[in-house]
Every structure is written in structure tokens, then in C-alpha cells.
Image (spheres, helix red, strand yellow):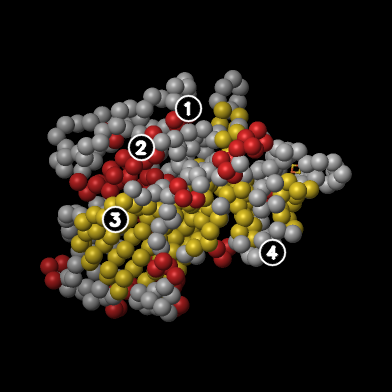
């Protein structure tokens, strides 16, 4: 998991005035709330510095959030401005929590989970098609996985699995070959485009899709899959009926739990009457993927590229793994907070540092909670396995030698029950 990125953590419409919202990301609890004065959203660490109560259980008052335990009042910058038990005494310098930058864009609330100054932050990707309500009709949804977000991301950009996992929906078992990719890359994304031959459309879409011919005469379809660091996927399909775009944020609740939130656009059947059908199709695909990805071992992506075998159609996943290693090397990874020692494991309260920690060095001693540890900081400590040397060369399309599998996974940090709701259950209905 990585700090220093913008994360789309929630749909804008689901953060409503006067109702603090608890979310969990990167093993951290945050509270989101909308200010009464200007309607903008605040994101604070959801951990009261007094006795660790969850601020999200409190109430919003005068743009501040009031802790439900002893009523300490935190302003949008994360500073305590009132301690009701001692109204006449000064407020300690340490009475503050981290406050993270927030923007609302493309129907999502984006929270910056890191401490870099604005000009050094990685970009939010251009997802402006979501705002194009003339050419597209959108449905949105969420889906909870008991698996690691990087496994899910790789699944999302992988076209070679579709004939086998989604045969009948959009994968075609008659034609599983993956032709040459065209790719577009930047340090923050990789888009791979390919021409595929999907099966005949069924159900509602089959009514207007002109792809009823035999495989040989069926019109091919342009498909692009894009990953954006650290956790996003865009799938674009130019169907004969019109374009389809699925934007996914794979929110790492912790290493082993992922909440996917998606916006799916379609440039055809733009009436509300086709929404349910469109949503059902996406949930069907997600459930098919879940059946496979939840059973993948090791659960976390290995650090060593050679722990798994790559072929040419895995190009974009290999690129993702290389970039991920670079991020680990630059100290952006986030380790879990569980301390394992004598006796039962304890969870140490550590937080992702917010920008003010760097902006105001005089506050250096004013942070009660220490920063999360990264793999770099931990290097050399006995609880971290040494990093295996990285291979930067693309593997051959035809691997010639057997490579030993598995074994290089990270230590799982203990699964955490998630308080989030998803539509998995609803979708089954
Ligand atoms: S725990 Fe929050 S005010 Fe005491
Ligand atoms: Fe899939």
C-alpha cells in the first residue's frame, strides 16, 4: 500500500452535510464531513488524540467536529479548539490530528494521503468523461473484496483472462489469442489497447448489437485497459452499439480487503430504464473475477518479479510491478501497524503524515501519533524479509526455464473487519 497519492475514497453524493462519515483506507480510519459554511469536505484522522475515540461518531458543529467521548472540538485543520472540561485553560500543542487535502472531482471525493507539498503530488487522472452527461449515461456501485487491491488491479487490466473467466459475457473462448498491444505510458499510468472478438451479445444488449454474425464476420471491438497509480483502473470498450467506459477505484481498506467503487458510462441505451441491466452486467463480471482473485496465492503481490511467470500479454502488469518497486524504493510504501511481540499482537496507533507536518517544522514535536512505517524505514529490522533483487528486463514471450514460484509475499498484517457497506449482497439478489 502506498502513501503520497490522491485516493478516490467515496462518491461525492454520499458525503452529506451534518453527517460525519467514517471510511477506512491504507489501514487508517478517517472521518469525512461537509462544512456547513461552504459545503467543502474535510478529511481528518479518525482518532481522537485524547483517548482514541472515533471522531466519526461525533457531530459537526460550526465547521468543526466534536468528539463523542469528552467533547473536544477539532477544526478543519485538525487542531483542537475547545476542551469543554477546562474552558479556561490553554489547549496543549499536541491536541491535534492530521488533516488531509480533499478535492471533489468526477463524482468522487479524492483525499491526499500523504505529506508532499502540492507541486510534488502525483496527479489525479483525467476522468472528465464522467462529467460528460450528454454523451454518456452513468451507473455507479461498490463491491467489497476479501483480497488485495493490487491483485484486483492486475485482474482489471488483464485481457487474457476474459475468455476463461468471462466467457459468454465479453470473453470469447473461440478466440483467446491476445494480439499485439498498443501502449501509452507515463510514470503514473499505462494504457494497453487491443482488438478483440467478443461473443454475440445476449439479453437486452443483444437486441441492438449488430454482432450476430459468425465469428469470422463479426465486427472486432477495440478494448483498452489502463492502470493509474496506485489503485485505479479504466476499461474502455468500443462496442458496435457505442462506447463503454468503466472507471474503478480499488480502495485498499487494508492489505487484504478492498472496496471497489465504480462509475460505468455507456454511450448507448441512455435512458434510466437500462440502468439496472447495465449494473447487473458489471456485478456479474465482478463476481466472476472475485471467484478467481480471492483464491489467488500468495494473497499479496510478490516483491520479486520472478516469483510468478510473465508472458507477453502480462506486459502492463509487469510494468505496474516495476513502478511499484520504485515507489517502495523511494519510501512511499505503508506498512501495517500491528506489533507482534511477546503476548498477543497489539495494534500501534500510527498515522499517515499530512502535509502540515512538513509545512510547519515547528510542530515537529506536536504530533502525538507517530508516522506509519514504510518498507524502506523498516529495512534491516528483523521482522522484514530482505528485498530480493529486482529484474528490470521484460521476460521473454516464451519462457524457457522454470522459475520457482511463491514464497516472496509480504507478511499479512491480520485481516480487519470492514465497517463499509457494499452492494455485493444486493447484487446477488
Ligand atoms: S476521547 Fe475524544 S475527547 Fe476524549
Ligand atoms: Fe475480469
Work out whether mark 4 precedes mark 3 in sequence or the reverse, and give the earlier one. 4
Q: Residue at x 32, y 45 (%)?
A: 320
Q: Quadrant of residue 172?
A: bottom left
Q: Quadrant of residue 126?
A: bottom left
Q: Residue at x 47, y 58 (%)?
A: 261
Q: Which residue is mark 3?
A: 191
Judge whether 411 appears above or below 121 on screen: above
- Does the residue at mark 1 contact the one at mark 4 (Cβ under 8 Å)? no
Q: Residue at x 21, y 56 (%)?
A: 182
Out of 190 and 311, give the one closest to the viewer: 190
Out of 83 and 303, give the one closest to the viewer: 83
Which of label 4 and label 3 is nearer to you?
4
Residue 325: which disc?
A: 2
Within-10-Å neighbours for mark 3: few <14, some 14–19, many 20+: many
Q: Which residue is mark 1?
A: 378
Q: Is mark 4 within 8 Å of ligand 1?
A: no
SS assignment at label 1: helix
- In the rendered image, residue 301, in percent from the top left (x then y), is placed at 37, 38
Work out whether mark 1 precedes mark 2 in sequence or the reverse, and give the earlier one. 2
Judge whether 135 appears above or below 231 on screen: below
Q: Which residue is mark 4?
A: 36
Separation of residues labelled 1 and 2 (CA atoms): 15 Å
Visible residue check, residue 360 = yes
Q: Please indicate whether residue 260 sits to the left or right of residue 165 in the image.
A: right
Separation of residues labelled 4 and 3 (CA atoms): 40 Å
Within-10-Å neighbours for mark 1: few <14, some 14–19, many 20+: some
SS assignment at label 3: strand
Separation of residues labelled 2 and 3 (CA atoms): 19 Å
Q: Residue at x 62, y 35 (%)?
A: 364
Out of 206 and 86, give the one closest to the viewer: 86
Work out whether mark 2 precedes mark 3 in sequence or the reverse, and give the earlier one. 3
Work out whether mark 4 precedes mark 2 in sequence or the reverse, and give the earlier one. 4
Amino acid at each position: 500500500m502506498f502513501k503520497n497519492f490522491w485516493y478516490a475514497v467515496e462518491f461525492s453524493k454520499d458525503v452529506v452535510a451534518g453527517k460525519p462519515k467514517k471510511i477506512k483506507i491504507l489501514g487508517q480510519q478517517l472521518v469525512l464531513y461537509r462544512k456547513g459554511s461552504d459545503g467543502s469536505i474535510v478529511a481528518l484522522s479518525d482518532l481522537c488524540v485524547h483517548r482514541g475515540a472515533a471522531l466519526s461518531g461525533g457531530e459537526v458543529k460550526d465547521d468543526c467536529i466534536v468528539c463523542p467521548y469528552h467533547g473536544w472540538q477539532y477544526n478543519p485543520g485538525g487542531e483542537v479548539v475547545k476542551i469543554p472540561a477546562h474552558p479556561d485553560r490553554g489547549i496543549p500543542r499536541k491536541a491535534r490530528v492530521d488533516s488531509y487535502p480533499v478535492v471533489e472531482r468526477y463524482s468522487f471525493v479524492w483525499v491526499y494521503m500523504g505529506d508532499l507539498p502540492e507541486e510534488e503530488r502525483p496527479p489525479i487522472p483525467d476522468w472528465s468523461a464522467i462529467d460528460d452527461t450528454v454523451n454518456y449515461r452513468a451507473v455507479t456501485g461498490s463491491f467489497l473484496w476479501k483480497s488485495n487491491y493490487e491483485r484486483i488491479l492486475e485482474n482489471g487490466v488483464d485481457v487474457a483472462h476474459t475468455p476463461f473467466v468471462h466467457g459468454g459475457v465479453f470473453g470469447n473462448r473461440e478466440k483467446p489469442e491476445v494480439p499485439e498491444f498498443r501502449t501509452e505510458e507515463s510514470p503514473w499510468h499505462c494504457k494497453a489497447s487491443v482488438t478483440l472478438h467478443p461473443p454475440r451479445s445476449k439479453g437486452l444488449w443483444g437486441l441492438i448489437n449488430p454482432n450476430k454474425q459468425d465469428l469470422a464476420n463479426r465486427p472486432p471491438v477495440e478494448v483498452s485497459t489502463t492502470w493509474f497509480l496506485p489503485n485505479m483502473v479504466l476499461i474502455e470498450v468500443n462496442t458496435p452499439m457505442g462506447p463503454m467506459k468503466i472507471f474503478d477505484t480499488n480502495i485498499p481498506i487494508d492489505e487484504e480487503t478492498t472496496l471497489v467503487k465504480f462509475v460505468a458510462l455507456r454511450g448507448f441505451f441512455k435512458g434510466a430504464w437500462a440502468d439496472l441491466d447495465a449494473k447487473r452486467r458489471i456485478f456479474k463480471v465482478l463476481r466472476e473475477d472475485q471467484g478467481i482473485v480471492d483464491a489467488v496465492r500468495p494473497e499479496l503481490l510478490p516483491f520479486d518479479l520472478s516469483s510468478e511467470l510473465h508472458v507477453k500479454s502480462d506486459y502492463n502488469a509487469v510494468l505496474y510491478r516495476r513502478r511499484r518497486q520504485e515507489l517502495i524504493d523511494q519510501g512511499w510504501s505503508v506498512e501495517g501497524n500491528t506489533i507482534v511481540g511477546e503476548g498477543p499482537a497489539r495494534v500501534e496507533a500510527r498515522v499517515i503524515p499530512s502535509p502540515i507536518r512538513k509545512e510547519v517544522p515547528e510542530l515537529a514535536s506536536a504530533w502525538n501519533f507517530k508516522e506509519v512505517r514504510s518498507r524502506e524505514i523498516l529495512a534491516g529490522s528483523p521482522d522484514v524479509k530482505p528485498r530480493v533483487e529486482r529484474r528490470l528486463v521484460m521476460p521473454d514471450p516464451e519462457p524457457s526455464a522454470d522459475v520457482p514460484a511463491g514464497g516472496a509475499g509480504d507478511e499479512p498484517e491480520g485481516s480487519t473487519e470492514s465497517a463499509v457497506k457494499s452492494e455485493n449482497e444486493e447484487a446477488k439478489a
